[in-house]
Image: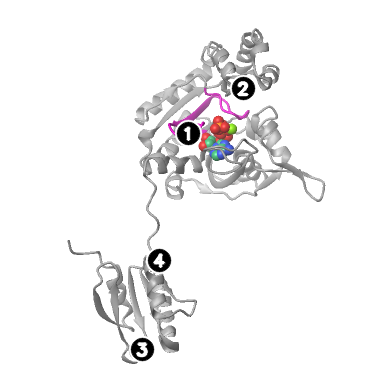
Amino acid sequence: MHQTVGRYGYREIRLPTFESTEVFSRGVGEETDIVSKEMYTFEDKGGRSITLRPEGTAGVVRAVLENGLLASSPLPLKSYYIQSCFRYEKAQKGRYREFHQLGIECFGTHEPAADVEVMAVAYDLLVAVGLADVVTLEINAIGCPSCRPVYHEALKQYFSEYRDKLCDTCQVRLDKNPMRILDCKNEACQDIAKNAPVMRDYLCEDCVEHFDKVQKLLQEADMAYVVNPRIVRGLDYYTNTVFEFIAEGVGTQGTVCGGGRYDGLIEQLGGQPTPAVGFGLGLERFLMLLEERGKLPPPPPGPALYAVGIGEAGRAAARRLAARLRTMGLAAETDLADRSVKAQMKAAGRLGAAFTTVLGDDEVAAGKAMLKNMDAGTEVPFELAATDALYDLLTAPVTGA
Ligand code: ATP
Ligand code: MG
C-alpha cells in the first residue's frame, strides 16, 4: 500500500490518536452518525473534551492548517495515513470499535482529474492484490452549497408525508439533514427512500459539468463504474463527487472504500477556501475480502540462516556470522536461550530457516563448517571467513526438479 500510493506522489502523515472534540464536531458534522452516536469522547485531566479519532480527514486538515502546509508545499498537496480509528458501533462482521484505515487526501485542486486519480489509487490498491473484479465502483454527485439547499427542500417535502413511518433517527434527520435518510439502513426508511427525488435532477450547471467530466475521465481510464443516486456518504463535508467501492461478502456492509470531494471542509476548519478530494479504505474489510478469496499473501519467509552454536567459542562464532550476514541484508538468527544442539535445530525448523550451520570448537579451529539446506537436506562446506561466498550460497536461486 505504501508503494502504490507513493507512486502517485502521496507522502505519509502521522497524526495523534485523539484531537479536540471540536475538530470532529465541526469537521465531520454534528448530525452525522459518527459524531452524534459513534464517538469516544471524554474529558482529560485538564477538563478539555477530547475524542479518539473516528476518521482521518478532519485530523489531517487540522494538522495541515496548523503547520501551514498548504502555503509551504507545491499544490496539490498529497497526504496519506494508515491508522486506527475508533467508533462506538454495534460490533459485527466487518464492523469493529477499533479498526484501521488507509486514507489519502489531495488538497488544492478542483479539477475532475483529481477526483478520478483518487479513485484510481483505490482501484490500483485493489488490482495489486487481485481484488479488482470482486468490487464495483459506484459514484454519485451530491451537489454543492449552491444547488443542495434546493434539493434538501425537495427531500423535506417528500419525506414529510411519511414522517410517522420513518425511524426515530430519520425523523430528526428530516429537520436537520434530510439527505442522510437516503442511506439509513432501516428497511422501512429504505422503502420510502426508493421514490425520493434524486440529486441529479437538482444539480447546478457547474456540478453537472463536473460530474460529466468525471465520468468521461473514468471511461478514458478504463475504470468500470456505475452511477448510484443513493450514495450520499455518511459525512457532512462531502460536496459534488462521492464514490464507494462495494464488494460481496464483507459482513452487513459491503463498502471497502469510500470517498469523495470535500471542497468546504478546509474553510470550515478555519483555513482559506481550498478544494480537496480523498478516500478512506477499511483495512479489516480489505483483509476479509482477501481471506475469503484465498488471496492472503503467504507468511513471511523464515531466516536465511540459523547458526547453531556449541560451547562458548561456537556460540560466539555463530553470533558473529549472523551479525555479518545481517549487515549484508540477510535475516539470520542464533540461539538466545542456551539450548542444546537438538533444540536449536528444532527451533531453526520451526522458524522455517532456509539453511542451518552447526559451529563448535572444531569448526572454529578449522575456520570451516557445513551449510545445510533444510529443504533438500543437502550439505556443502564453506569457510567461516569467506562471507561473500557464503552470501552467494544463501541467496542462490533454488535449482533442481
Ligand atoms: P458504513 O456504511 O459501513 O458504516 P461508513 O460510511 O461509516 O461505512 P466511512 O466513514 O466512509 O465508512 O469509512 C471508510 C471505510 O472504513 C469504510 O468503507 C469501511 O471499509 C471502513 N469502516 C468504517 N467503519 C468501520 C468499522 N466500524 N469497522 C471496520 N471498518 C469500518
Ligand atoms: Mg458507519
Q: Is residue 2 visible?
A: yes
First along the sequence among labels 1 and 3 = 1
- Report if the beta carbon of the residue with label 2 is closer than 8 angstroms to ligand 1: no
| Foreground: disc 3 or disc 2 | 3
Q: Amino acid at mark 2?
A: Arg
Depth order, front residue of 331/224: 331
Q: Position of residue 17 (x, y in %)?
A: 65, 48
Observer-nearest of 60 and 382: 382
Judged from the image, the secondary structure of the residue bearing numbered disc 2 is: helix
Of tags 2 and 4, which is closer to the observer? Answer: 4
Tell which circle, 2 or 4, labels the residue nearer the N-terminal end.
2
Q: Amino acid at mark 3?
A: Val
* Residues rendered magenta in the picture: 231-258
Residue 236 is inside the magenta segment? yes
The residue at 44%/35% (across/down) is 117
Q: Which mark is residue 219?
A: none
Q: Main secondary structure of the magenta part?
A: loop
Q: Which residue is mark 1?
A: 114
Disc 2 to disc 4, how far (Cα)? 52 Å
Could you classify mark 2 by the number of other residues whose Cα lies within 10 Å: few (under 14), some (14-19), or many (20 or more)?
many
Check if residue 348 falls in the magenta segment. no
Q: Which residue is mark 2?
A: 180
Q: Which residue is mark 3?
A: 364
Please determine whether, in this image, residue 161 is positioned above or below residue 140.
above
**Side of 370 where 209 appears, left or right:** right
User: Alpha-carbon neighbours of circle 1 within 10 Å: few (<14), some, or many (≥20)?
Assistant: many
Left or right of 45: which side holds 306? left
- Asked whether 314 or 199 is in front, the reply is 314
Spot occupied by residue 52 in the image (x, y as percentages of width and height)? 67, 44
In this view, 283 is above or below 169: below
Instruction: Specify the label residue 351 is tagged with.
Output: 4
